[in-house]
Image (cartoon, rainbow, N blue to C red):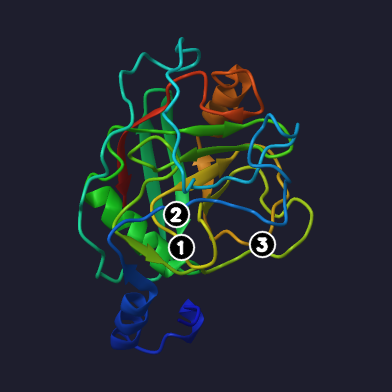
Amino acid sequence: MRMINSTKMKSPAAIAALFLSAILISGCSTTGVTDEQALPAESPSASPSPAAPSESASPATPATPATTGPCAPSSAAGSTAKDVGAPNDVLPAKKYTFALKTNCGDIEITADGVKAPVTVATLAFLAKGGFYNGTICHRLTTQGLYVLQCGDPTGTGGGGPNFTFKDENLPAQVDNNYPAGTVAMANSGPNTNGSQFFLVYADTTLGANYTLWGKITKGLDIVKAIAEYGTADGSGDGAPKATVEIVSATVK
């Protein structure tokens, strides 16, 4: 399937056809962020540098943080992914606000529906269906890679919806190509986007493999506070020490 470029879309019918061609329905989804070019090891114990954000093909049991730190107490944990169907609506090509209400504070993201139309329409569909409500951000990296990864209902890094969709709006392969405030999709390889995404809280260099779809406009300080509190096991790559729950997600 070819890339969707909103600047080449000629009509609503063409937009709809391209949107539908970007969605691949599957029995299950194990999308995630793996980066063959970036940091060398999947396991933080194998290297001081963590692997790129990824949706694991072999999910681990979610860690249970012992304290709340910068966040309000939450009992949220991983659960079976909600089946909300598959998206088929096309949104007008413009910018939207993707709002995450969390137990750590409110985070707002400007979602670029011009450069990443399929991604933003899919996120809006998932948010409208309540897919993200009550989920936790399952991964935090603090060494060499500076991201908080969210969007997996199972809380393991291996969950997602029953469909995947293709990449769009990939960055250039340059230093700090994922600057602080960037929001991008996690994946398990080319064109395997699902529901997982990562919030970049400090300038990060990764392979040009992850769809850029948003910029944090409110709440970057919240993500930084979560990162400063560290991981549950004290490593540079693991579950956040504080439970980070997405209470609700909306797109407007």
Picture disc at residue 192? 1
- Residue 92 seen from this side: no
Q: Amino acid at mark 1?
A: Thr
Give x and y (percent) for residue 65: 46, 16
Q: Residues within 10 Å of mark 2 (few under 14, many from 20)?
A: many
Q: Residue furthest right?
A: 175
Residue occupied by mark 2: 31
Query: In the displayed structure, does residue 245 sit left or right of residue 232?
Result: left
Q: Amino acid at mark 3?
A: Ala
Callout in the foreground (2, 3): 2
Give x and y (percent) for residue 240: 52, 24
Query: Number of numbered discs present?
Result: 3
Q: Amino acid at mark 2?
A: Thr
SS class, disc 2? loop
The structure residue drawn at horizontal position 38% and vertical position 42%, both measured from the top left corner, is 152
Residue occupied by mark 3: 208
SS class, disc 1? loop
Vertical relation: 44 (above or below) 89: above
Query: In the displayed structure, does residue 8 sit left or right of residue 91?
Result: right
Q: Residue 235 falls in which quadrant of the image?
A: top right
Q: Residue 14 falls in which quadrant of the image?
A: bottom left
- Residue 144 seen from this side: yes
- Cα gap from disc 1 to disc 2, whole angstroms: 6 Å
The structure residue drawn at horizontal position 39% and vertical position 34%, both measured from the top left corner, is 155
Looking at the image, do the residues carrying marks 1 and 2 touch, with CB atoms under 8 Å apart? yes
The structure residue drawn at horizontal position 41% and vertical position 52%, both measured from the top left corner, is 30
Q: Residue 130 falls in which quadrant of the image?
A: top left
